[in-house]
Image (cartoon, rainbow, N blue to C red):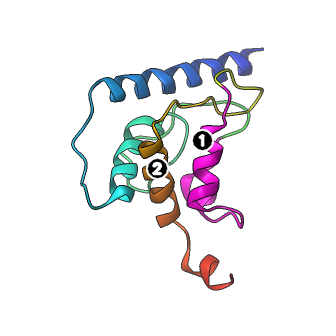
Amino acid sequence: MIRRGLAVIAAITACSVLTAIAAHPQTKPLDDSAEAGRILALRACTGCHIVASDQPYMPIYKGARRPPDFKDIANKSDSSVGALRNYLATLPAVPKSFQMANPDLSEEQMRDVSNYIMTLRDMSSTSSR
């Protein structure tokens, strides 16, 4: 029961951060959606995920299952910008056990974060395709 409570708190925290970001849009590089995705992810996703090796602080989520690092997500065999964008778009507002809540991102934000995640893919993962 405590673990589920922590998951709900983490989801609410993530949604609150994303709402604040949406209310105060930041200037993003127009020619680099991956960099915009990195900036957004560092602000909104680090509560649960390791977004970048140089992120300023570690995730605060302490549930039974630690959410995957973005690098691990990028290196899954079925990961692509389209698959990641679709995953983010179809997450439920109220998550099931051990599932991420819908972060309520715009189409552009989902594309940017997905583009950033895919920049983390190891070169050996792409050469075998």
**Mark 1: amino acid:** Leu
The quadrant of the image that shows the N terminus is top right
Side (left or right) of 23 relative to 50? left
The crowd level at tag 2 (other Cα within 10 Å; few <14, some 14-19, many 20+) is many
Q: Residue furthest front?
A: 107
**Percent of width and height locating residue 41:** 43, 44
Q: Earlier in the sequence, mark 1 or mark 2?
A: 1
Q: Secondary structure at mark 1?
A: helix
Residue nearer the viewer, 51 or 113:
113
Asked where in the image residue 56 lies, by quadrant, the reply is: top left
Q: Which residues are magenta?
A: 67-92
Q: Is residue 116 above or below residue 121?
A: above
* Residue at 55% in and 53% down: 70
Tally the marks.
Answer: 2
Residue nearer the viewer, 120 or 63:
120
**Residue matched to label 1:** 88
Q: Are marks 1 and 2 in contact (CB under 8 Å)?
A: yes
